[in-house]
Amino acid sequence: MPEGLPIDHEHPLNGTMAAYAQQLIIATGRPDWTSRIEEDGQGEGWGELARGLKKLLGRGGKYADPYNNILVTNSSLPPSPSSSSTTASAFLFPSFKYIPSIPTSLPSETLDVASPASLTTFVRAFLLPKTLHSMHGSVPQSQREHLTRSPDLASHFPATPLVHSPTVFICGHGGRDMRCGILGPVLQAEFQRVLRTKGYPSTESDGETVDSPGHANVGLISHIGGHKYAGNVIIYIPPGLKIEGGEVSPLAGKGIWYGRIEPKHVEGIVDETLLKGRVVKDHFRGGIGHDGEILRL
């Protein structure tokens, strides 16, 4: 690393992943972004999605909830060819879904809050909690219904389930911190190379192939916290992934966060975590289960 950009090799990594309920990863097709992603992508659907979610879920937003942390992240994976200035594409974990067309419009006087063309409808369908935290016990029943998820609205947003393809995200947010900005692209190339040799070719070419046997999604993402632990890597293991021997992976349906990853570690990470279903403890920052439970060692 260049002088002045040190990596923290002293503090324990376990537990350094901030707890979150879901991670929504926006497909931008770009390898880097400004420091605050909600200020980027003016006139682009992906930029409007980040801004709209910030308004709805951020501090002071209509659906702000400190017990329902939605981690909104940009990625270099390409959006669907059908996306436009008023729609965007995104991955949702640990739900393991890809939604190719998400409306970015917020309700107005001429747009009903439950309209399929509203971002609010998407938030209510996927991002609100299934039940409110016990600390919300004083909220009236009439309001509780508007603060919890409405699964029936999900039918407005056709989604591709991610069953077979592992998804690897590497923080490469150089617009935020150059440690990840330098290491991210190098690690992305190495993960792509190693996965290809293991029978998992990856591509960022068309924005359509996101799940198929023998395919992996590998992309750069924006800030996830902990630049001092670069390289930061998240591996989402799909529920149908099989390991050596033909059994379903013990890590199926989980997201595993790693830190202090260098190119020399990539082959071992792929072998242990993807091919054998094991966590590499020395690099483990935390994880999330299919139902949103936070994983610690």
Image: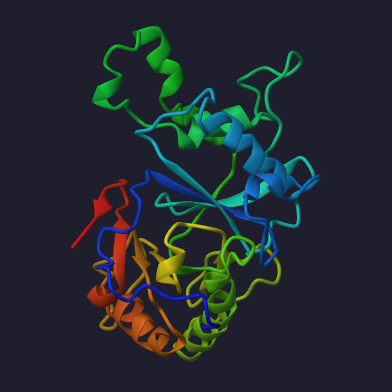
Could you tell me residue 283's position as x and y percent? Answer: 30, 74
In the rendered image, the residue lying farthest to the left is: 297
Give the quarter of the figure containing the C terminus. bottom left
Q: How many marks?
A: 0
Q: Residue at x 43, y 28 (%)?
A: 149
Q: Residue at x 40, y 78 (%)?
A: 261
Q: Based on the displayed image, in which of its 4 quarters is residue 75 positioned?
A: bottom right
Could you tell me residue 67's position as x and y percent? Answer: 34, 33
Could you tell me residue 12's position as x and y percent? Answer: 24, 68
Position of 103 compared to 183: left or right?
right
Residue 26 at least partly seen: yes
Could you tell me residue 165's position as x and y percent? Answer: 47, 68
Q: How is the image coloured?
A: rainbow
- Of 245 and 148, nearer the camera is 148
In the rendered image, the residue lying farthest to the front is: 4
Q: Residue at x 51, y 75 (%)?
A: 5
Q: Is residue 111 above or below residue 179?
A: above
Q: Is residue 46 above or below residue 272?
A: above
Residue 243 at least partly seen: no
Q: Is residue 144 above or below residue 205?
A: above
